[in-house]
Image (spheres, rainbow, N blue to C red):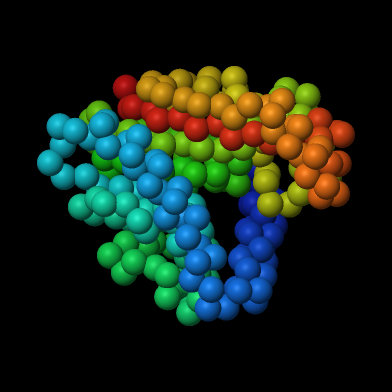
Amino acid sequence: MQRAISTVRWEKAQVYERDFWSRQVSAATGEMSRYRWYETRAEGIWRRAKPFFASQTRISVLEIGPGPVGIVNYLEADERHALDPLENYYSSQPEFERVRDRGVIRHNGTGEDILSLGKTFSFVILDNVLDHMKDPDRVLRGIHRSLDPGGVMFISLNVYTRFGAFVRSIMEYLEIDKGHPFNFSRSPVISLLRKSGFQVLWSQTEDYAAQKRAYRQSGEFRKVLKSSLGVVDFRFDAFCRRV
């Protein structure tokens, strides 16, 4: 079980996240294609997700922590919601508003606030956000309660080897990386999902050795350093059903 972090630590992570997106706005005002990767990502996720909803006549989706645009922006669902603690900031930026689909109902709040929405969903998306949460256990329990019977959650996050996760935990304690209060390796994530009441229907893990080699050969100082320190992150994706 992951222990919740302090409010002070979580707020530092939110400042880090907001500063990151502020830099993106300053660097690329008016470049609509800059956010095209959301659409590409959505296409791949939706293609795998649709068979799980083959018997449903109406599909409602919630994405937690979508950032300024989100995967939900491009899904073909009957009802779409987004929940993000920086939503009030994102909605104030014309750069983001130009890209957003107004059919998405956006809420300002954390993943821990999911039950306050007072709704249930067919599909919940957690794309690269579990390690940003204040209380991952509480978020997953809330999602479990907010899914319709037979509902599905898609989760994706960057994981590490056990050694990499240990080194990352030291970096987080020292606040070298303020944006990621938590780190995970693959096995603890699967255990956490099962303890939270989910059955893993499908999962895929990026090849660590290939990712480490790519980092080492990239020529980018930070990636080469990560490769040398053994803190290379590699993606874990899974579709899970509420049981």
Say above or below: 42 vs 216. Answer: below
Q: Can you say which quadrant of the picture contains the N terminus?
A: top right
Q: Can you say which quadrant of the picture contains the C terminus?
A: top left
Q: Quadrant of residue 233?
A: top right
Instruction: Write the residue at 34% across / 42% down.
Output: 46
Say above or below: 143 vs 23. Answer: above
193 lies left or right of 219: left
Where does residue 156 sit, x and y in percent of width and height?
51, 37
Instruction: Write the residue at 30% across / 48% down.
Output: 61
163 lies left or right of 28: right
Where does residue 99 sit, x and y in percent of width and height?
42, 70
Say above or below: 80 vs 4. Answer: below
Of residues 158 and 178, the one drawn nearer to the viewer in this rendering: 158
Instruction: Write the residue at 50% across / 32% down.
Output: 237
Of residues 7 and 182, the one drawn nearer to the viewer in this rendering: 182
30 lies left or right of 39: right
